[in-house]
Amino acid sequence: MSHIFLISPYHTGSHRAWARGYARHSRHHVHLLTMAGRFWKWRMQGGALELAHQIQQAVAQHGPPDAILLTDMVNLPALIALARPWLNDVPLHFYVHENQLTYPPRPGEKQDLTYGMINTLSMVAADAVHFNSAYHRSTFFDALPRLLKHFPDYNHLEIIEQIQQKSDVLPVGLDLHYFDAFRPAKPASGPLRILWNQRWEYDKNPQAFFRVLRALAQEDVEFELIVAGENFRQQPVEFEQARKELAGHILHFGFAASRARYAQLLWQADVVVSTAIHEFFGISVLEAIYCHAYPLLPRRLSYPELLPTSLHPTHLYTTETELLTKLRWAAQNVATVRAQNFSHLAAVYHWQHLAPRYDTLIIS
């Protein structure tokens, strides 16, 4: 049995769940080297100092690793320089949850190319690069030439092909069986229940979601609303406004107090909606789909990959008007919506299926 060091310097949320999930399901010994999930810019700029120290301690305890799996928040060239004595001849696998080149900046902010360049140099230094979706991989390589050409000289465009040749698509593994224990014994009743279970952030485009729901409410369409997801802002104005305007429809509004409560909310939902303008994978949507929520997703980003093409006409939309039409139909045909079950589409991402794939790629 081999030893893998998994390095996760932004160890919270989906990054933490991914790291812990692989450690639990791998046939190898996976040792987690982590830092608290905050100050992401400092993690990319200076985290290598702490990580090199942790590598030294881990080698003293477990011996040298057979491979290292690290996330996109690691400045890999800096880590290699600082931890050189312990990384010689160790395969380095760079896992790209997100990248700072194609991640959309906040409204009013200008993109800082520093962090996109750190990602790029880390990919050059890695032995293998794993993107979490085909969309993520293609958009990164579409943007990379523009990044390199931005600089005045010595831009080494040949690295694009070099990175492409050692890159692949390796989806995020999910612990979906956790949700099984919370499946309700009785079938749902009452009006359509619409779910939002994404972060309360600009890149998830909550304004569009609430515009469509207000239009639905103005038509006197019956529905109930479940708004979960984590809030990283002190005053998310659009959510507070929606809480007041849609008060008569709200079943739940706010971050779930526990994972168990979150699971219960997913099982209560009939439809899961995304209006995101940015998504590299789609964990929250897949969790809802596993719990039998009927997906209505944008015809963009990574979402088309989550569904077979035969379902695209009914479950993907292009405009807010089209989303409104699909929600109106769902509210008028609640029994039909509740009778459909697409959990098998999410189940393929369970760790029991993906961990062996990770193991084979990392320890070859």
Image (cartoon, rainbow, N blue to C red):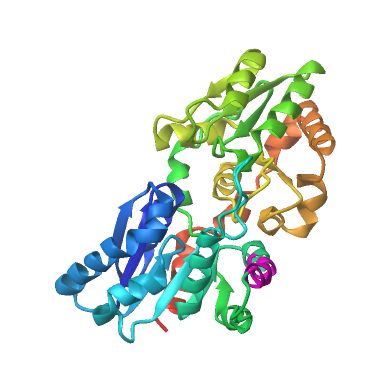
Q: Is residue 272 above or below residue 217?
A: below
Q: Is residue 158 left or right of residue 86?
A: right
Q: What percent of the width, then of the height, locates residue 353?
A: 49, 65
Return the residue found at the far bottom. 89
Kindly identify the residue that appears in the image at 80 percent across and 32 percent down: 324
Quarter of the rendering occupied by the C terminus: bottom left
- Main SS type for the magenta part? helix
Kindly identify the residue that appears in the image at 72 percent across and 36 percent down: 337
Q: Is residue 88 visible?
A: yes
Q: Is residue 142 highlighted in magenta?
A: yes
Q: What percent of the width, then of the height, locates residue 327?
A: 77, 32
Q: Report the front residue among 342 and 119.
A: 119
Kindly identify the residue that appears in the image at 46 percent across and 36 percent down: 182
Q: Is residue 271 visible?
A: no
Q: Image quarter for residue 266?
A: top right
Return the residue found at the far front. 152
Q: What percent of the width, then of the height, locates residue 349?
A: 54, 59
Quarter of the rendering occupied by the N terminus: bottom left
Marks counted in the figure total 0
Instruction: Give, as a single range, the part of the protein colored magenta.
Output: 140-150
Q: Report the front residue among 44 and 277.
A: 44
Q: Image quarter for residue 134?
A: bottom right
Q: Is residue 177 left or right of residue 164?
A: left
